[in-house]
Amino acid sequence: MKLCSCLTLTLALACVVGCDEPLDESLLNEPPAVAEAAPVDEAAVEGAAVENASESRPVVTIDDTQSEAQSENTDEPTQKTVRGSYNALSPNAAFVLLRKGTEPPGDGGYTLTKDPGTYICRQCNAMLYRADQKFESHCGWPSFDDEIKGAVRRLRDQDGRRVEIVCANCGGHLGHVFQGERLTKKNVRHCVNSISMKFVSKGKPLPAKIVAKPTSAPEMPEEKVTDKAAARPQE
Ligand SMILES: [Zn+2]
């Protein structure tokens, strides 16, 4: 009976979303918001799971000062990590990175950039994409068919259809990822706002990746809350 209800749920879900650009669960690396309502296709998720095996939480294995982020790809430059405050953002950059806005399409920014180098997060400097992962999609935004390993997290977009991509280190909004368009062999398009990134030409030093300092008010001071609650007269 359990199988039956599960199947029914699956069919119902497929029917609901099937008519309107169904969300490709294989692109997600976050569990569905309602796990029971969205059975996971193990086969579809396997690739993403492997790809992001170490990434359900951003990889921030650093000491308190700095460390070298060694990459498996020898073409990727190394990058130091520091604790500190994120880069200040212009109002337009904050609109995109922090409030999940979208910059207008066009040839501005990095849409047509083909120089060798590395694209880093504008807010925290984390390496996101290599120039050799970029391709011309003619969609009006910079497009990449892969990311630097562990650099990008995939989330279910609030619209329920698309897959949002954010910087794995700082959570800044980058854009969306699409699969199945057959634009490149990898068949994936990261559609990224130029303003979410900064480009560092090959050979130039990368700024250190910034890991946010713990906030001055860590966790909820449970005892104090309890004390307050206790001190406050009930009702
Ligand atoms: Zn970032």
Image: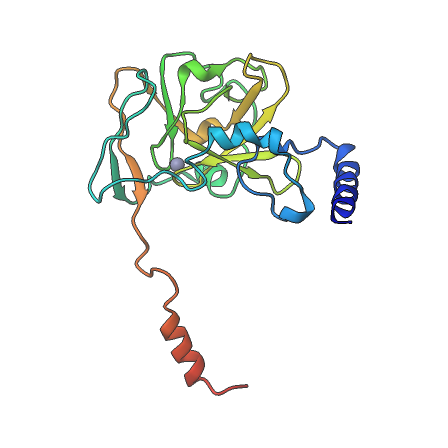
Tell me which residue sits at (66%, 48%) in the image: 36
Whether residue 116 is situated above or below residue 174 in the rendered picture: above
Give the residue furthest to the bottom: 233
Query: Does the image show residue 140?
Result: no
Q: Judge by depth and name the residue closer to the eye, 20 or 15.
A: 15
Q: Judge by depth and name the residue closer to the eye, 127 or 193.
A: 127
Identify the image quadrant of the C terminus: bottom right
Q: Quadrant of ligand 1?
A: top left
Position of 166 with respect to 156 (left or right) is left
Dividing the picture into quadrants, the one containing residue 82 is top left
Position of 77 with respect to 30 (left or right) is left
- Across the whole image, how many numbered discs are drawn on residues? 0
Whether residue 43 is situated above or below residue 38 in the rendered picture: above
Tell me which residue sits at (31%, 52%) in the image: 214
Tell me which residue sits at (46%, 38%) in the image: 97
Dividing the picture into quadrants, the one containing residue 183 is top right
